[in-house]
Image (tube, helix red, strand yellow):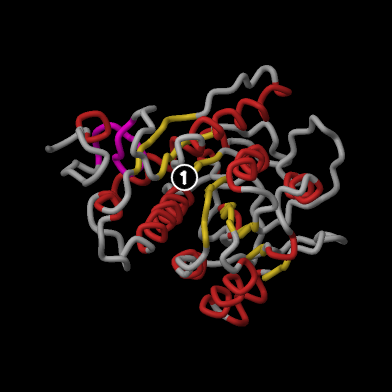
Amino acid sequence: MNGDGAFRRKSLYGSGIENTYSGALSFLRRNYTRELAGVDIAVSGIPLDLATTFRPGARLGPAAIRAASVQLAELKPYPWGFDPFERLAVIDYGDCWFDAHNPHTIKESIVEHARTILASDAKMLTLGGDHYISYPLLIAHAEKYGKPLSLIHFDAHCDTWPDDSNDSLNHGTMFYKAVKDGLIDPATSVQVGIRTWNDDYMGVNILDAAWVHAHGAAAAVEKILSIVGERPTYLTFDIDCLDPACAPGTGTPVAGGLSSAQALAIVRGMGPANLVGMDVVEVSPPFDHSEITALAAAHVALDLLCVLGSRLV
């Protein structure tokens, strides 16, 4: 089969031959479908940026990550050396629909979107969208896998600033809410790449950017795995974890961040973690240059699939 595998491929497994510059832009050319039978991982987008506090544009992130992913579907991913789609049945489920003009309905729309997918026993890899989306996703994942979950959180910001409003949309407070709601256990959670101040990190373990620069990726992997252990763990990757030199296309860039090489090395070391859900968020294409931010996000998402695929050997 040559070309447009997103709607021509008969099986959920395997890869075909595509021209990287043309064809249907599903994530990594996977089948576009809402049929969940036999699916291991459902990739979907949540095109939200109403919760941003600085630059907008993350609503365009899922489309940009899909477009950047096409060249990564051409060869076996490096350094893995295997085709993850020979081991995993992965689909592109499309985007979560919500009414952007009725903001108070958005949280429940995302929760229901996630519940539908998780009810099939497929895992979720979600493309944002701003980082608020992790909060309703955690609600659905905690219902599925039991609470509290552990959290691996890559970010420049801790996102645990106080917010006791039930209806707020804020991409800087959702993990405050998640801790308060008992969705995540701070003692067995870790935030990586942090480089903004908070007077109270709510007991979450912090490996800030300076720590990673000083100790290296291998030490970060060892520390993260020791914190989360074998507990059900949700992994969220805010692209602003990367230094703006590596990811300019994001809403709240902060200097001094991780390089793409550092972040990918850490992500690739997450094989022993019991990952039950994942997201990659905060790509803002209007502020991107040469698509390098979207490309970095696509690499992170592909490596997360390979991490899960590596567990099946």
Residue 93 is situated, as x and y percent measured from the top left of the image, at 41, 32
Reading the image, the residue beneath label 1 is 123
Q: What residue is shown at x 68% (from left), y 69% (from top)?
A: 208
**Rendered position, 224 above or below 140:** below
Task: Give the extent of the magenta segment.
Answer: 21-32
Q: Residue 223 magenta-drawn?
A: no
Residue placed most toward the observer, 100 or 111: 111
Disc 1: CA contacts within 10 A as few (<14), some (14-19) or many (>=20): many
Residue placed most toward the observer, 63 or 164: 164
Whether residue 29 sits left or right of residue 225 in the image: it is left
Q: Residue 22 magenta-drawn?
A: yes
**Rendered position, 128 above or below 252:** above
**Rendered position, 61 above or below 153:** above
Residue 257 is situated, as x and y percent measured from the top left of the image, at 61, 65
Element class at badge 1: strand
Q: What residue is shown at x 42% (from left), y 48% (from top)?
A: 290
Q: Quadrant of residue 200?
A: bottom right
Residue 12 is situated, as x and y percent measured from the top left of the image, at 27, 39
Q: What amino acid type should be assigned to the residue bearing mark 1?
A: Lys
**Rendered position, 208 above or below 198:** below
